[in-house]
Amino acid sequence: MYAGFKNKGLFQKYLLFALLLILMPPLISAEEDMSAPQILTTDLIRKQKISKPEKIISFVVVDESSISEILINGVPQIFERADTVVINKKFIFEPGKTIVEVIAVDVSGNSRKKTFLVGLGEEVDIDEETKKDANARKFFLKTSFALSYELDSNPTNDFSTPVPVKGMDIKGVVDDSEQADYRSVANLTLVLGTGMVNGFVGGVKNTYFNQKNKSINSQAAFLGVGLRLKYLEDDFLVLNYLLTDVNVGGNDFSQSHSLTPGMLFNSKDEEGLYKHLWTMNYTSADFSDSAKTDSPSYTFKWEYHSLDTELLDDYRFLFAYGKSSSGTKDSELTFTGFDFDWYNSWESGLKWDLGFGLQYRKYATAEPLTDKFLGGTRVDVPLRFSNAFGWQFDQDWKLLLNYRYSLNISNKSIYVRSITGLTLKGAF
């Protein structure tokens, strides 16, 4: 879990970053997209003059992921996939000006282009081209979606227990035999950005088939923007804003504004890639129900992410602590949560994802059904187990059979819920 701290001097980087925040914050500057491959050469510069037509040029392409494609003047180069690729190529230049264009693409679809202008037998003047290149911005546009058809055993989180309690007849509002319902879930997101600044817009729709659950059908639309500024080597400052509008049962429910500043630390060794993301989230919710008060929520998060060099085994850990409210005094609570998720793939395409999570919620004033269990105020301990098997056709397309089991241990509202379904995920 702590493999991200293997690089020597990482402690010094954290210390230096703290000093920068205190003493010299204006020194933080924007950089180009670091997720795309880096194209390096000592044999060419942006513009140059040569006296001989023949020249052997070496290009070194480096990326956190494997390099999948390299084009030189539109011609694909032959190489073995790796995170570092060396291409040696002999050029015979014609008199006059010649442009050498190199494009590198990694397995995640991130790409970078570099151009070099070479002059043979005459003075090279490309001031105009240099200005255009310096002012150019590399935009990317990506659309992703997910479609699910699922069986939900308890859509309303109705009171229920996983096992019968001897000597007690515990029943919820809805009989257990009538709780289950099928639902469809559709999610669509459009992302536009430059690497340093990214914007996204999308929505999710959750529809139950049974008319009795019409009141819990939900739709949410969201719009956001993210900013990433490099300050030391591969480490970044991040700042995200998110606007979310939620409808429930065909009626307005809430609109929220969320601001999340944070720090992203990246590292790499011979075994894989590692990321530590520390964020502090502030969310202000405006509820359409006049009986609910507009109260802010705060969340501190630490997210750890490791990915092996073959891009097959992906592990993610999340720790969260915060305070939230659903607009009423009895819904005010503090929470501490942990999530552990493994995403495993095989080169053949087989995929298996496994996850576990738990959270401890303590309410400020809500009274429990009994004070003999978990204390004199309401306490919830929701547990989550998820499992998915399926097939990954390529980096963007996958089909999964999902199972998610939830159990809420509580002195106020005990419930069990499982969701089973088929999900298609894609991007283009």
Image (cartoon, rainbow, N blue to C red):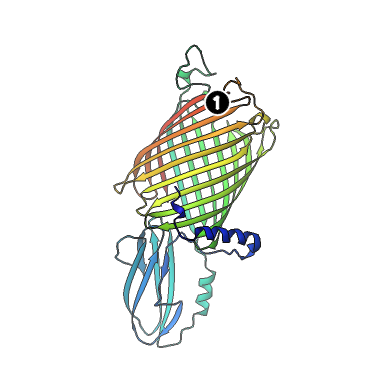
**Res 244 quadrant in image:** top right
**Residue type, numbered disc 1:** Ser
**Residue 15, relative to residue 410: is it above or below?**
below
| Frontmost residue, 375 versus 278 | 375
Q: Tell me, yes or no, if residue 196 can be seen here.
A: no
Left-right relation of 385 to 86: right
Please provide percent x and percent y for residue 262: 57, 52
Residue neighbourhood size for the residue with mark 1, other residues' Cα within 10 Å, grouped as few (<14), some (14–19), many (≥20) = many
Please provide percent x and percent y for residue 22: 65, 59
| Frontmost residue, 293 versus 97 | 293
**Residue at x 39% of width, y 61% of height:** 105
Q: Tell me, yes or no, if residue 418 can be seen here.
A: yes
Q: Which residue is mark 1?
A: 410
Left-right relation of 11 to 44: right
**Residue at x 35% of width, y 83% of height:** 94
Left-right relation of 377 to 125: right
**Res 369 quadrant in image:** top right
**Res 340 quadrant in image:** top left
Secondary structure of the residue carrying numbered label 1: strand
Q: How many marks?
A: 1
Please provide percent x and percent y for residue 338: 50, 39
**Residue at x 48% of width, y 61% of height:** 34
| Frontmost residue, 252 versus 317 | 317
Please provide percent x and percent y for residue 132: 52, 72
**Residue at x 56% of width, y 27% of height:** 215
